[in-house]
Amino acid sequence: MLGGKPGLTAYEEFVERESCPECRAKLVDVGGEVTCPSCGLVLGTSSTSGIIQRASEAMPEALGSYIGQMPNNGGHRSYPGRVFGASRLRPDAIGRDASLIQCSGLTERVASRFLLPKGVVKSAVLTAARLLPGRKVYRATVPAISAYSLLHACRSAGISRIRLSDLLKAYTEAGHCVSKSQLLRIGRESSLPLPAVRPEDLIPHVVAKLQSDAAITRRIKGANLEERWYFAKLLEEARTTVTGARGLGGFSPRTLAAGSVYLACLRVGPKVVRQREVAEAIGIAEYAVREFCSRYRKQEEAR
């Protein structure tokens, strides 16, 4: 029992008072959904028209202009409706737990776009649970915590095909503004830095991209090479090359992987793969691969 009302959880008590359980802002009714105009949390649908102040009545600007406005905390009215969205999933949710529910749902939606394994998603949710209590210290939003946690889980699982730019684009398309600087700040100020990307983990991704290119497979057949043998040999040779390139500084893991694959292409047989195709397979500039190959050859000559 809370506030003299039996049967209400702490979460529901806040909604009874028309206050957001996450940021305590005044709730509004937007198209039949009970929503917080400050943090964007959706608590469910309103069953009674006019019980919660509608956005058009609270702020008469154009539809959607209430986002980012200062919440109106004055005057509370009773709210007899009992539709509580997130509290159905977690009846004891309040404050930080509500943020975790919001973060988990967003993480699962974005992860589904990349067809990530359930274990990676679960790892991301656990990472977010560790980061959310300190999000004010990091000055990070819930979507930024979600993006960082998902990237951290992918790196930890050795999933190299998920690039930071792809992840930021996915969150933007989902309606959330997440910047690279936010993620860098979380990694710098939290106790959970991002695991380093290893070039060895990126090489299979590059080779798989080349193998799916129809133009390259046609050239391989034209050179009278067996396709399966060629790519298996290419993978083996590229791993040997990247081991010998560890002494070269100033190159990103993606450049090391792409350059090693291109040099391996030149060693395995006829030139059936172009430098530009290798660079595009991993999303880097062609000149980066060219610079890597030049410095690698000079290193080999010096030996």
Image (cartoon, grey):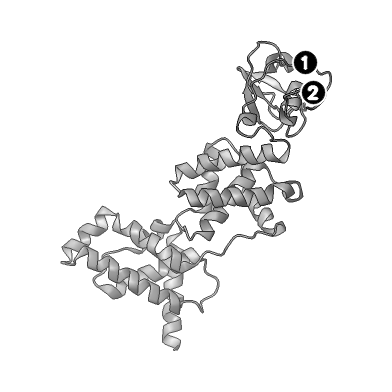
- Find the residue positioned furthest to the bottom: 303
Mark 2, secondary structure of its residue: loop
Q: In screen coordinates, is 206 left or right of 151?
A: left
Q: Secondary structure at mark 1?
A: loop
Spatial CA span between label 2 and label 1: 16 Å
Contact? badges 2 and 1 (CB < 8 Å): no
What is the x, y in percent for residue 259? 41, 69
The outermost residue toward the top is 49
Residue topped by disc 1: 78
Relative to the observer, which residue lies in front, 303 or 43? 43
Residue drawn at x 76%, y 23% is 6
Residue sitting nearer the eye, 75 or 261: 75
Pick the front one: 20 or 40 = 20
Q: Amino acid at mark 1?
A: Ser
The quarter of the displayed image where residue 94 is located: top right
**Residue found at the very far right of the displayed protein:** 74
Instruction: Give above or below for 252 relative to 150.
Output: below
What residue lies at 23% left-to-right and 58% top-to-bottom? 217
> Which residue type carries mark 2?
Asn
Few, some or many residues within 10 Å of mark 1 (<14, 14–19, 20+): few
Q: Is residue 36 visible?
A: yes
How many dots with numbers? Answer: 2
Which residue position holds label 2? 72
Residue 102 badge: none
Q: Is residue 180 visible?
A: no
Left or right relative to 23: residue 158: left
